[in-house]
């Protein structure tokens, strides 16, 4: 009994396993059918036919698929009462249904006579089918955008551009992906799994001394293809069956050598059980071909026969031939991909010919793609757009392929003698060429034959003749592909066929369109030469916009010329608008992309600039604000690899660790050499750049989102106008070297120590930008420079912090970022001012920075970053005429401010004509850009910008984005409830602060003694603070810093002009006003960025506030650690508790373990 029970259990397990294998086979077969790329009707019909095999009783099972009012049945379909159904719905709202019927009653299981596993199967099948239909519907939508009726609106848009929606980020994503989407949709069917059936000896005879897998896959590596198939080898039917039942295979290869019977027997059984899997035969020699042709049983199981000729490329050709056969219909519809039709019935010859053809087409496609600047992934994708090669072995097959793909046919390559109407025809090839030429007169054709006498007939048919037995066969094919299929240069000809110009690159192609005669435009346009050449380069979108358009669609050839230029500008990938592209000496520099002068990382600033560039040139801001041109300056980046090379080749790595004298470091760096390659590029670059240039640092962590180093490293502004070119070159080279050296400055080293960062981990990229502005009487500067932030920590009136703020000044941006007196406003409410007229006069800009354009040999070592600058009084700007729209006049008699400079009186730089009367939409531009960039980065941001009020040829002023960086805040919000506070235990309370979070470990407070403060001696305070900060850094102790006026300002009369490294260990900074020393709102950009990004609290205390206070009495009672002339350092016995409420912008410091009610938000 036990044995019978055990046997029944074994039988049950075996039966279950068979059912699961049937279900797996059904999924695999369905997937295979979907990959074939057939029509929807054909696909659903084939799936319906295979479904019964997957259920328990296949002989008594029928199936039906219902979709979109169509019905697809299996053989002998009949409805019964024993039914299993599963519905599905597509994204387009169309409903479908899969039905399985048993033709007789069977015992009940989980769902009537059906198993629960069969419910899972039918559910999975419905998902697979619905997803497939969704993809087809999506492709139809994509295809519609290129249909003939959709081309007309494209021409209309060319003639009269329209403004589209304001969904800027979605438009950006659409534009970024548009060129790639088509490539992703090409070649949906890929051979991923190959089952190789061969005896070990036969495999060895082909392998010889190499590795077999390398023969098959080597071509993939050589061509940088990514989807390499996996090969599984078997030698028996049992092994083959085991593999085929465990996973899906795309192709079976039978290798026939010394023992033809075994592989063929295996192939026959495989075909019988898995009829949907293609089977190719690879003969070890051509002696077996005749016997193969005579054996009908072999012909029935084999889809294609190939002959091993000693070239491992045959495996690659076998795989690609199958993929092309399946993908051709899809790729020609979706991507306008071309088709090469080859007609050859000899297995020996097409086995030799196809590898040569594939290798050449792939190499030529790869070569022209490498000539185009784009990323590696895109290059791989573009290889999918290569021409598809379809093989016909009879006249009838050739005609069928021709009729199906004649609109996409690139060329015909045909033998002369092959079967027609079931018989061998001696002139079938000539007849085929004639018939094809009746419909496609200009189609390139090749007649190939081993009989050279056929060359005369080929010449009469205006076809290229290639001798099959030629020793130069490869060169002959290559020559044909280059000169006839668009892979070579584009040769412009006139109406008589005479060559008038040659284009090697897409840029040259575009440039020649401007100059070629009208008859040449018509000559090439009528013959579709433009689209053919562009298609060969993978420029599918451009080709698709040109191909359906007729010259007659335009009023004259000149309008057709303009349309070609418009389409190329709009769609061509070669321009890489908004991308980082490598430097080319012959290329013309423009502002639409970032140019790379060296490999490696771009650094924080370079990364931000690349992001700005991508945003601007992929989002059409002009549609929203047409009166202003939002752009970036011409920008180049030297990647960090050049820095590594500079340090290594000049043996500087050890030197910078042993020498801490920054002057000496800079001197040694100047004596060192940049690489020859970079020097050569700089020489070519400076021949093009004639305006002043800024050479700026872009370290790995500078302006990054994790640990920003803002304003720590060097920037040099150079006039770039010395009459001696070699001096210009040396100045630029020296500036780059000194930017490298700035990593090892005293300030930078202090910064590294303050944040516990290893010096060796920092690397430097360099940004080179053309300075925005115009020349004025020996100097150069923009009308306006400034910074703006998307979050305002000091809102007034009805403003919200999220409204952001901006600071603007006349001249170069150094004036603003260093915290000097400039005009602060809200881009959302530019007219709101919280200061009186006299206060505005008192706080107005009185000087500005410009580049000194007087030719001289700058001493960058001695004068540093200021070497190329000059500081001028604001009255000089008025003389230059640049103050006209930027300033107002204070009317003393009426205590009012009058916009413009029409009346005498003190000048106030408040940009009234621009902000109040909108001479240009500066406020709107800032508001738009801040919102877009904030959304794109997912965090508050700061930008630096410049404005050129000189109008371009389209009547627009220029708003130039110079830099972008994120503002980082604490992750957790805290709430302070004033009603719950015990003010007796409060040391400090501020209702205007920035920062967020809780700090519990600080015991030290360093403060400027109010009674000793003198606003004329603020610089004398700095050494005392710096010395104490150094001690705190060494002890690794954070502290609270308190003092009058604005910390970090450049103007010593409105605050203490410290640099960030001099107070780098301060965790909380407090600014306070005094009766004779009010607070100014001109916080320096770099200083501010370091405060916010390092989560340092910044508190503001107004001495006359009803709520703000500092308890000086308690502060003065603490233990004195150091008491200097201006600064006192005290230490509390217990740690202070510091709470910063980022939302309400209030902050509190308590002592003696007094902790108020604080609720995490």
Image (cartoon, grey):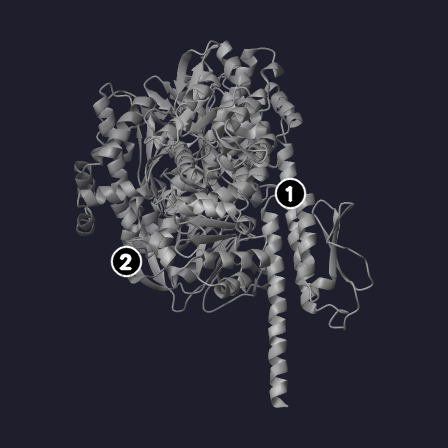
Quarter holding residue 1037: bottom left
Q: CA distance from mark 2 to mark 1?
A: 70 Å
Quadrant assignment for the N terminus: bottom right
Say whether residue 971 is visible. Answer: no
- Which residue lies at the image location 55% right of the left edge and 59% below the top edge? 269
Mark 1 lies on residue: 136
In depth, the one of 583 and 977 nearer the eye is: 583
Image coordinates of residue 228 in percent, x first then y, are 44, 50
Image coordinates of residue 676 in percent, x first then y, are 22, 34
Say whether residue 942 is visible. Answer: yes
In depth, the one of 1139 and 40 nearer the eye is: 40
Image coordinates of residue 512 in percent, x first then y, are 43, 17
Image coordinates of residue 975 in percent, x first then y, are 57, 59
Relative side of 486 to 62, left or right: left
Quarter holding residue 118: bottom right
In depth, the one of 328 and 754 nearer the eye is: 328
Relative side of 87 to 228, left or right: right
- Most extreme residue toward the bottom is 1
Relative side of 50 to 332, left or right: right
Q: Mark 2: give few (<14), some (14-19) or many (20+) Cα within 10 Å.
A: few
Depicted 1002 relative to depicted 590: above or below: below
Q: Which numbered circle lies on residue 1031?
A: 2
Relative side of 632 to 856, left or right: right
- Which residue lies at the image location 61% right of the left edge and 89% below the top edge? 2
Q: Which numbered circle lies on residue 51?
A: none
First in sequence: mark 2 vs mark 1: 1
In depth, the one of 583 and 325 nearer the eye is: 325
Q: Are marks 2 and 1 in contact (CB under 8 Å)?
A: no
Secondary structure under the numbered disc 1 in the rendered image: helix
Secondary structure under the numbered disc 2 in the rendered image: helix
Quarter holding residue 309: top left
- Which residue lies at the image location 61% right of the left edge and 58% below the top edge? 27
């Amino acid at each position: 009994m036990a044995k019978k029970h055990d046997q029944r259990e074994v039988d049950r397990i075996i039966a279950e396993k068979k059912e699961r294998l049937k279900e797996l086979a059904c999924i695999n077969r369905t997937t295979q059918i979907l990959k074939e790329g057939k029509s929807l009707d054909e696909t659903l019909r084939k799936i319906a036919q295979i479904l019964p095999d997957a259920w328990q009783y296949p002989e008594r099972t029928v199936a039906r698929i219902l979709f979109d009012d169509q019905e697809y049945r299996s053989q002998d379909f009949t409805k019964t009462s024993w039914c299993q159904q599963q519905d599905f719905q597509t994204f387009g709202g169309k409903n479908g249904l899969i039905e399985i019927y048993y033709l007789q009653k069977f015992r009940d299981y989980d769902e009537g006579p059906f198993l629960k596993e069969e419910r899972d199967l039918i559910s999975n099948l419905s998902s697979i089918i619905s997803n497939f239909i969704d993809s087809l519907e999506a492709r139809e939508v994509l295809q519609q955008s290129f249909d003939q009726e959709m081309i007309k609106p494209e021409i209309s848009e060319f003639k009269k551009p329209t403004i589209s929606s304001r969904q800027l980020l979605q438009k950006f994503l659409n534009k970024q992906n548009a060129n790639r989407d088509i490539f992703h949709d090409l070649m949906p069917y890929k051979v991923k799994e190959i089952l190789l059936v061969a005896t070990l000896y036969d495999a060895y005879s082909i392998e010889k001394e190499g590795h077999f897998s390398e023969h098959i896959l080597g071509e993939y590596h050589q061509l940088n293809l990514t989807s390499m198939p996996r090969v599984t080898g078997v030698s028996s039917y049992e092994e083959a069956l085991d593999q085929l039942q465990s996973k899906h295979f795309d192709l079976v290869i039978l290798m026939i050598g010394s023992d033809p019977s075994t592989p063929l027997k295996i192939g026959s059984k495989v075909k019988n059980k898995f009829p949907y899997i293609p089977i190719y035969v690879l003969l070890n020699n051509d002696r077996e071909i005749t016997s193969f042709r005579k054996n009908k049983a072999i012909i029935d199981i084999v889809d294609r026969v190939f002959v091993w000729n000693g070239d491992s490329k045959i495996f690659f050709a076998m795989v690609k031939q199958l993929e092309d056969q399946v993908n051709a219909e899809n790729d020609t519809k979706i991507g306008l991909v071309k088709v090469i039709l080859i007609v050859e019935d000899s297995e020996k010859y097409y086995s030799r010919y196809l590898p040569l053809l594939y290798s050449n087409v792939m190499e030529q496609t790869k070569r022209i793609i490498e000539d185009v600047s784009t990323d590696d992934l895109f290059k791989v994708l573009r290889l999918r757009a290569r021409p598809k090669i379809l093989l016909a072995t009879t006249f009838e097959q050739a005609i069928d392929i021709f009729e199906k793909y004649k609109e996409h046919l690139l060329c015909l390559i045909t033998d002369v003698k092959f079967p027609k109407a079931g018989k061998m025809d001696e002139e079938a090839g000539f007849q085929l060429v004639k018939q094809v030429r009746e419909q496609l007169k200009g189609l390139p054709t090749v007649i190939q034959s081993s009989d050279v006498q056929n060359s005369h007939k080929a010449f009469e048919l205006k076809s290229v003749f290639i001798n099959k037995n030629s020793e130069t066969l490869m060169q002959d094919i290559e020559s044909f592909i280059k000169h006839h299929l668009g892979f070579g240069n584009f040769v412009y000809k006139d109406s008589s066929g005479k060559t008038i110009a040659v284009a090697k690159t897409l840029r040259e192609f575009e440039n020649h369109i401007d100059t070629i005669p009208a008859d040449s435009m018509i000559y090439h346009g009528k013959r579709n030469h433009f689209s053919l050449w562009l298609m060969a380069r993978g420029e599918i979108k451009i080709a698709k916009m040109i191909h359906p358009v007729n010259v007659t669609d335009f009023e004259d050839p000149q309008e057709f010329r303009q349309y070609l230029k418009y389409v190329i500008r709009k769609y061509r990938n070669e321009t890489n608008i908004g991308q980082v592209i490598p430097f080319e000496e012959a290329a013309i520099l423009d502002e639409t992309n970032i140019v790379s002068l060296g490999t490696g990382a771009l650094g924080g600033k370079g990364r931000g600039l690349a992001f700005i560039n991508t945003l601007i040139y992929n989002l059409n801001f002009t549609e929203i604000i047409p009166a202003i041109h939002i752009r970036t300056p011409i920008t180049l980046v030297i990647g960090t690899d050049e820095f590594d090379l500079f340090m290594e080749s000049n043996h500087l790595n050890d030197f910078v660790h042993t020498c801490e004298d920054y002057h000496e470091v800079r001197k040694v760096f100047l004596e060192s050499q940049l690489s020859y390659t970079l020097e050569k590029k700089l020489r070519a670059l400076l021949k093009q750049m004639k305006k002043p240039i800024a050479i700026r640092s872009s370290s790995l962590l500078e302006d990054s989102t994790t640990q920003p180093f803002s304003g720590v490293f060097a920037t040099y502004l150079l006039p770039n106008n010395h009459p001696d070119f070699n001096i210009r070159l040396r100045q630029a080279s020296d500036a780059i070297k000194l930017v490298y050296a700035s990593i090892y400055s005293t300030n930078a080293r202090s910064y590294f120590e303050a944040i516990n960062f290893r010096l060796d981990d920092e690397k430097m990229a360099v940004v080179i930008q053309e300075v925005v502005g115009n020349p004025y009487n020996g100097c150069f500067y923009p009308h306006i420079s400034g910074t703006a932030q998307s979050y305002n920590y000091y809102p007034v009136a009805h403003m919200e912090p999220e409204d952001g703020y901006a600071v603007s000044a006349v001249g170069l941006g150094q004036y603003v970022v260093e915290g000097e007196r400039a005009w602060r406003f809200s881009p959302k409410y530019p007219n709101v001012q919280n200061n009186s007229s006299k206060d505005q006069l008192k706080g107005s800009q009185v000087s500005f920075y410009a580049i000194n354009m007087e030719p001289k040999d700058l001493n960058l070592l001695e004068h540093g970053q200021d070497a190329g600058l000059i500081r001028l009084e604001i009255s000089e700007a008025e003389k230059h005429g640049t103050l006209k729209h930027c300033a107002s006049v204070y009317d003393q008699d009426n205590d009012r401010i009058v916009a413009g400079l029409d009346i005498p009186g003190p000048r106030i730089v408040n940009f009234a004509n621009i902000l109040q009367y909108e001479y240009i939409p500066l406020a709107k531009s800032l508001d738009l850009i801040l919102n877009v960039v904030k959304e794109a980065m997912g965090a508050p941001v700061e930008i630096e910008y410049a404005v050129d009020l000189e109008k371009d040829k389209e009547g627009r002023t220029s708003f130039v984005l110079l830099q972008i960086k994120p503002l980082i805040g604490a992750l957790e919000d805290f709430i302070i409830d004033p009603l719950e506070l015990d003010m007796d235990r409060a040391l400090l309370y501020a209702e205007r602060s920035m920062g967020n979070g809780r700090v519990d470990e600080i015991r030290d407070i360093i403060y400027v003694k109010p009674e000793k403060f003198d606003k004329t001696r603020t610089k004398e305070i700095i050494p005392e603070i710096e010395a104490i900060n150094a001690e705190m850094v060494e002890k690794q102790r954070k502290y609270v810093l308190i003092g009058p006026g604005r910390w970090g300002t450049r103007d010593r009369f409105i605050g203490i002009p410290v640099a960030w490294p001099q107070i780098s260990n301060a965790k909380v900074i407090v600014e306070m006003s005094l009766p004779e020393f009010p607070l100014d709102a001109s916080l320096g950009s770099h200083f501010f960025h370091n405060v916010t990004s390092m989560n340092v609290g910044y508190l503001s205390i107004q001495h006359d506030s009803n709520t703000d206070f500092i308890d000086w009495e308690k502060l003065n009672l603490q233990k004195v650690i150091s008491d200097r002339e201006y600064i006192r350092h005290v230490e509390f016995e217990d740690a202070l508790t510091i709470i910063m409420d980022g939302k309400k912008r209030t902050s509190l410091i308590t002592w003696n373990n007094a902790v108020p009610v604080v609720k995490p938000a």
